[in-house]
Amino acid sequence: MSNYAPFIKPYVEYNEHGWGPCEVPVLDVPYQPFCKSDRLGKICDWTVSLPDRKFPNKYSSSFGNNSQYAYFHEDDEATFRLVDNSGSKAFRPYQRGRFRPNIRNNARARGRTGRGNNIPGMHGGPTAGGGTSNIAKYGRGRDARRNMGRRFNRNAPTRLRESSVVVRSNWVSIEEIDFSRLLKLTLPNIKEGQDITTCGSLEYYDKLYDRVNLRNEKPLLKMDRVVHTATTTDDPVIRRLSKTMGKVFATDEILATIMCCTRSNYSWDVVIEKLGTKVFLDKRDSSQFDLLTVNETSLEPPMDEEGSINSAHSLAMEATLINHNFSQQVLRIGDHEPRYKFEEPNPFEEPGVELASMGYRYRQWDLGNEIVLIARCKHNGVIQGPNGEMQFLSIRALNEWDSKVTNSVEWRQKLDNQRGAVLASELRNNACKLARWTVEAVLAGSDQLKLGYVSRVNPRDHLRHVILGSQQFKPQEFATQINLNMDNAWGILRCLIDIVMKQPDGKYLIMKDPNKPMIRIYDIPENAFDSDGDADDDSSEPFGNSIDN
């Protein structure tokens, strides 16, 4: 007789009409709403010895403490004990050094009296290990708390961003390219763009604004001028040129967005229309493509607070208007002031409408493999060089809204003496925006990139601003300073063009993923954005096809 237990074959129900259970039991389970953005939380994490005191609810569920999901056991065993090793205070990390001298109070006392005990590690002095102290590394006073706060806030829960466009169910995904692959691309030896035609007129730069400083600040004025930002297919000059030359057509803003996509965090999208061998890169009529981002690449980007003047959308509107006003105010405006006129008049000129000083250069580049790119580029002003030659300007403005909220350098204290520190802070917080401006200046062939520093009169007032100073760079040299590789930028653009060229005729969409460093390409229907509203070619609505203050 065998000593082993007999094997009983389990009963398996077989569903002849599909997959899944044959019968669904009736269970009294309360309904609980759920969506993909909810945090489910962690049941248990054995790798963490102590709870996170700074973010105690990081892993908590979004469902709340609903009693219908609570577990109750009425007949617990009396011998049950909970093993708890938290009573040993010697191993608590936040108890280490509890009997050390109060360095913070001693530092204050030393600052008041000018004397004090020579505590090791204070004020950049030597430490017990022979190195430098944390205060010496991170600075002193408010700067130390600010920088150390940045260091520890890196573990904060990531905020989910919204996509620039809702992906429909009938869209077909063609390609997904992450930034690590895009950064490896390169297309060297792209020559300087050649002018096909030039349009518009430019006003001369007022050199008095080079003398503006903190002691001689100037208020930012409202300029009632219209700046047209028509997309590619709405440009009458590009329509005319596309009949006889070129294969790829775009504007400098669209090209700069694609070429600097690896530095972007926010979501954006570009519509592509392929007609035979012609490819048109467009922006959507109802998109916010022309709005400038603010602190996009900072450690703590602005929150999406509805109605707040410091929300991401409000700051974008403010920065866009500041750029428009600054680029026109620094010019010599007047009926009797001279103007530099290009070959053709402004293609967007309207009777009775005062247009901003804008010069358009339609240029072409040979990207190889018989791909000729034609793009509309622009200048904001002109200045006479030391040898009497004309130098074209790209004028942009950086804006300060609240240095305490952004944990950045305060301009009114350091702009005159430490302008490099101010620019370094802006390069850290607005890396993508500055890279786009640089690419636009390089594509247009600008001789100088003028950067203005504009700040709020009061951090709580987003309507009044002052000009604190300006700075100028050569675009090619500035690109080298900010580690902007133009060969890689051309390689990214050529890669995306090649992918679209292999597709059949139709409409496509390039979109930056809102929460991942990735570019997605979709095949979309022809009428995908018809419901967004039809915009007239000559419309002058703010931030649509034009900017009007």
Image: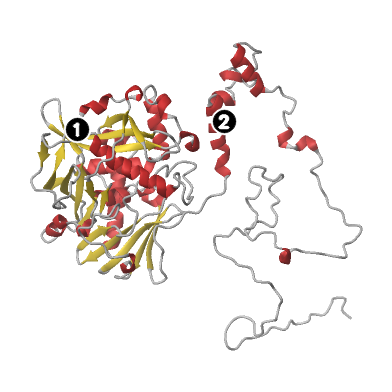
Q: Are marks 2 and 1 in contact (CB under 8 Å)?
A: no
Q: Residues within 10 Å of mark 2 (few under 14, many from 20)?
A: some
Q: Report the residue at 41% width, 65% height from top.
A: 167
Question: Residue 365: x percent and y percent?
Answer: 18, 49
- Residue 389 falls left or right of residue 152: left
Residue 396 visible? The answer is yes
- Which of the labelled discs sits on residue 145, or is there none? 2
Residue 265 visible? The answer is no
Q: Amino acid at mark 1?
A: Tyr
Residue placed most toward the observer, 2 or 45: 45
Question: Residue 381: x percent and y percent?
Answer: 19, 37
- Which of the labelled discs sits on residue 275, or is there none? none
Residue placed most toward the observer, 373 or 239: 239
Res. 326 image quadrant? top left
**Where does the N terminus fall, quadrant-wise?**
bottom right
Name the element at disc 1. loop
Colour pattern of the rendering: secondary structure
Quick one: which residue is furthest to the right in this view?
78
Question: Residue 70: x percent and y percent?
Answer: 74, 63
Quick one: which residue is furthest to the bottom in this view?
16
Q: Residues within 10 Å of mark 1 (few under 14, many from 20)?
A: many
Q: Amino acid at mark 2?
A: Arg
Q: Report the residue at 55% width, 42% height from top.
A: 154
Q: Is residue 246 above or below residue 456?
A: below
Of label 2 and label 1, which has the lower sequence position? 2
